[in-house]
Image (spheres, helix red, strand yellow):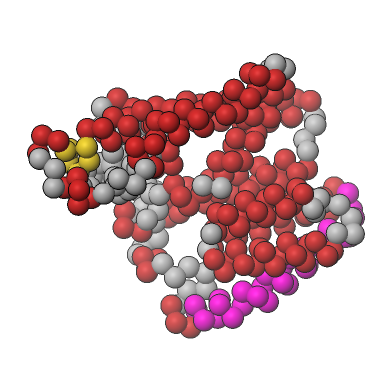
């Protein structure tokens, strides 16, 4: 629900043209949806902060007072609606924002965090011979990729049916659960297509921004998208570095799923500018998704 609300807020920021003047009514509606997202999950603070930053940037650059009024409306409405829940959490769970019981664990210094050991590693085994979770986090990148595109933790299958299979029909994975040979091969394949999609995103994302910076044509709405994208990614990274404990659940990509459609938008926009053939543009947009769905169907299908 939080991811859906965040994506809805991003869409409405564009659709309602919330950088335009005299949009007070729509700003109020947008703030009410934002408040619901904040009540759902604290991740929504990323889009709140992104909106405030883009309005502050516009206020400083253009010296238009209505941006300050927009900031005031968003903060007041969000605070008013969320304040009872914040007070309740502080009173009953001793935390203003998060009620994660593992927040009581010692928070590590970012520079000396234990998590740095795996942040920049790439676990090549997930593409070659072992696509599932190991007993320790070998690679932050591998978790982001494989947990996003596949069943990295081997949770989404008919556990009892596979457990009761003969030993020669099943494989024991790192989390103590079993998988079949077919699902094992499927995971390898979707990790590979996931890597292709990631490379597509990576090239397109940086190509888009390099072009915009070189040509000095940075769109304000794209800048807002960039703030949301970076906010999501760095929030996940920060949480990993501050609380690098497996049981906290920091090593799960679903915390930032909303950044993937944003990556697709930037990448496709870049390739659309470079490749004028409409047919190839459609292939670039749809082919990875179609191939992924075909490969991932054995996992997506409830067995």
Residue 294 seen in render: yes
Q: As displayed, is residue 102 above or below residue 19?
A: below
Residues in magenta, as a range: 62-90
Q: Residue at x 57, y 29 (%)?
A: 286
Is residue 4 found left or right of 61 in the rendered image?
Answer: left
Q: As displayed, is residue 201 above or below residue 74?
A: above
User: Is residue 85 inside the magenta stretch?
Assistant: yes
Residue 146 seen in render: no
Q: Position of residue 42 (x, y in %)?
A: 54, 63
Is residue 44 found left or right of 126 in the rendered image?
Answer: right
Q: Residue at x 55, y 41 (%)?
A: 260
**Residue 78 is drawn in which quadrant?**
bottom right
Is residue 159 found left or right of 218 in the rendered image?
Answer: left
**Furthest residue toward left:** 167
Q: Position of residue 287 (x, y in %)?
A: 54, 26
Query: How many circles with numbers are drawn on the protein?
Result: 0
User: Is residue 81 inside the magenta stretch?
Assistant: yes
Is residue 300 found left or right of 31 in the rendered image?
Answer: left
Q: Residue at x 60, y 44 (%)?
A: 229
Q: As displayed, is residue 142 above or below residue 60?
A: above
Is the stretch drawn in magenta largely helix, strand or loop? helix
Q: As displayed, is residue 217 above or below residue 232?
A: above
Q: Residue at x 52, y 73 (%)?
A: 96
Q: Nearer the viewer, residue 220 or 160?
A: 160
Q: Position of residue 206 (x, y in %)?
A: 62, 29
């Amino acid at each position: 629900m939080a991811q859906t609300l965040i994506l809805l807020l991003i869409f409405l920021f564009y659709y309602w043209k919330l950088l335009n003047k005299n949009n007070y009514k729509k700003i109020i509606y947008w703030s009410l949806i934002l408040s619901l997202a904040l009540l759902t999950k604290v991740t929504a603070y990323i889009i709140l902060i992104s909106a405030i930053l883009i309005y502050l940037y516009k206020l400083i650059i253009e010296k238009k007072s209505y941006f300050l009024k927009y900031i005031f409306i968003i903060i007041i409405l969000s605070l008013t609606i969320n304040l009872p829940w914040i007070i309740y959490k502080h009173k009953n769970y001793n935390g203003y924002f998060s009620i994660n019981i593992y927040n009581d664990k010692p928070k590590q210094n970012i520079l000396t965090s234990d998590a740095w050991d795996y942040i920049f590693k790439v676990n090549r085994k997930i593409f070659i011979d072992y696509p599932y979770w190991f007993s320790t986090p070998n690679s932050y990148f591998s978790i982001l990729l494989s947990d996003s595109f596949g069943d990295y933790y081997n949770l989404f299958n008919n556990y009892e049916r596979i457990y009761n299979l003969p030993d020669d029909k099943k494989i024991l994975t790192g989390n103590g659960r079993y998988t079949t040979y077919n699902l094992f091969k499927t995971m390898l394949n979707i990790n590979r297509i996931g890597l292709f999609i990631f490379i597509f995103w990576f090239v397109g994302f940086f190509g888009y921004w390099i072009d915009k910076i070189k040509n000095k044509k940075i769109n304000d709405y794209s800048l807002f998208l960039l703030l949301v994208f970076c906010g999501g990614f760095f929030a996940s990274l920060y949480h990993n570095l501050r609380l690098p404990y497996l049981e906290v659940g920091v090593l799960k990509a679903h915390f930032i799923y909303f950044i993937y459609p944003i990556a697709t938008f930037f990448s496709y926009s870049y390739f659309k500018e470079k490749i004028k053939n409409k047919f190839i543009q459609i292939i670039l947009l749809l082919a990875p998704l179609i191939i992924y769905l075909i490969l991932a169907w054995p996992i997506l299908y409830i067995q």
